[in-house]
Amino acid sequence: MAWRAGGSYPWCTMTGLSEHILGVSGAVLLAVWAALAIVLAALFWLRDRIPDRPGWLAPRLRTGAPTGFALTTAVLALVAFAWSLAVVTYSVIHHTGIARGDERVLAFFTGHRTPWLTGLAKALTWLGSSIVLWPVVVLAGLGQWRRDRHWLPAVLPGLALAGAWAGALLIKGLTNRPRPPAADRLTVVHGWSYPSQHAAQALATWGMLALMMMAGRSTRARVLLAAGAVLIAFVVGLTRLYLAAHWMTDVLGGWAIAGVWDCLLIICYLLAPQMAAPPGRRERAAVYRKAA
């Protein structure tokens, strides 16, 4: 794709990238996630507008308790992430569906390299590295403990990082997928390719940090925190593709692993007050957790 003057280049770049990425499997994945977002938005909007809700539905939509809408969202997201991980892994193992576009996406990124983008990618990719993330979660955990004196929110980001690291490492050993050609790489990498450990760690860690920082903040602040975490994870994924450290499906698989693990942690976090309280006091223990 040739360089375009003015503002047309970013639009052409995104259009070309979409054409490379969106095969049938990619379109199905996007459709599932779009449908999930629509369903969650509809449930949230209708939670107080349906006067005769079934008895089992009303508690699932209640926003005043951790076992309400927050838990419903976490469970639905867990199902979607797990399904996405299964689809992408199957595609990688059998080289079918969305994995067939890996070579085209790699060619797209290697064909649009510039010196300033290369330097930027090499710097931003560290946001998904364990070397950067472990000090971040330790400092954030200490700050969270000093502020709230609750140990669970303080350790959840560390658990998210450790789980994403271990999950990615385990699947790497099971799939044994080679990385992109060494001639295309702009960074030193080791080990197998699928899934991307950087992508998994970035989404799991920054996402959990954002969730734990949402407590006591306004809706606008929560939206900004969530958007910032997603943006960081997305940028880290793009840097792995730009540097030819991973295939496209490696990044998608890493994000899916992070989503599965974080959803499991969030579900445990939401259910912790219910499980810790005596049977006769579990209703009183269902205190709204704003971090959810």
Image (spheres, helix red, strand yellow):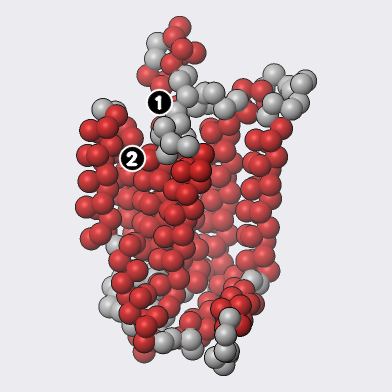
Decide if residue 263 is on the left or right side of residue 160. Answer: right
Which corner quadrant of the image does residue 32 belong to?
bottom right
The secondary structure type at the circle numbered 2 is helix
Q: Nearer the viewer, residue 282 or 49?
A: 49
- Which residue is situated farthest in the top direction here? 280
Dot 2: within a 10 Å radius of its alpha carbon, few (fewer than 14), some, or many (20 or more) residues?
A: many
What's the amino acid at mark 1? Ala
**Label 2 – label 1 distance at C-alpha:** 13 Å
Dot 1: within a 10 Å radius of its alpha carbon, few (fewer than 14), some, or many (20 or more) residues?
A: some
Query: Residue 22: in sight, yes or no?
Result: yes
Instruction: Give the answer, above or below, for where 292 lies relative to 58.
Output: below
Query: Residue 178: in sight, yes or no?
Result: no
- Which residue is situated farthest in the front direction here? 6
How far across and how far down the image is residue 77, in percent? 56, 44
How far across and how far down the image is residue 99, in percent? 56, 72
Query: Which residue occupies 54% across, 23% down?
Result: 64
What's the amino acid at mark 2? Leu
Which corner quadrant of the image does residue 194 belong to?
bottom left
Query: Which residue occupies 40% across, 26% down?
Result: 272
Q: Earlier in the sequence, mark 2 or mark 1?
A: 2
Q: Which of 191 and 243 is in front in this view?
A: 243
Q: Report the residue marked by disc 2.
A: 156
The secondary structure type at the circle numbered 1 is helix
Q: Report the residue marked by disc 1.
A: 272
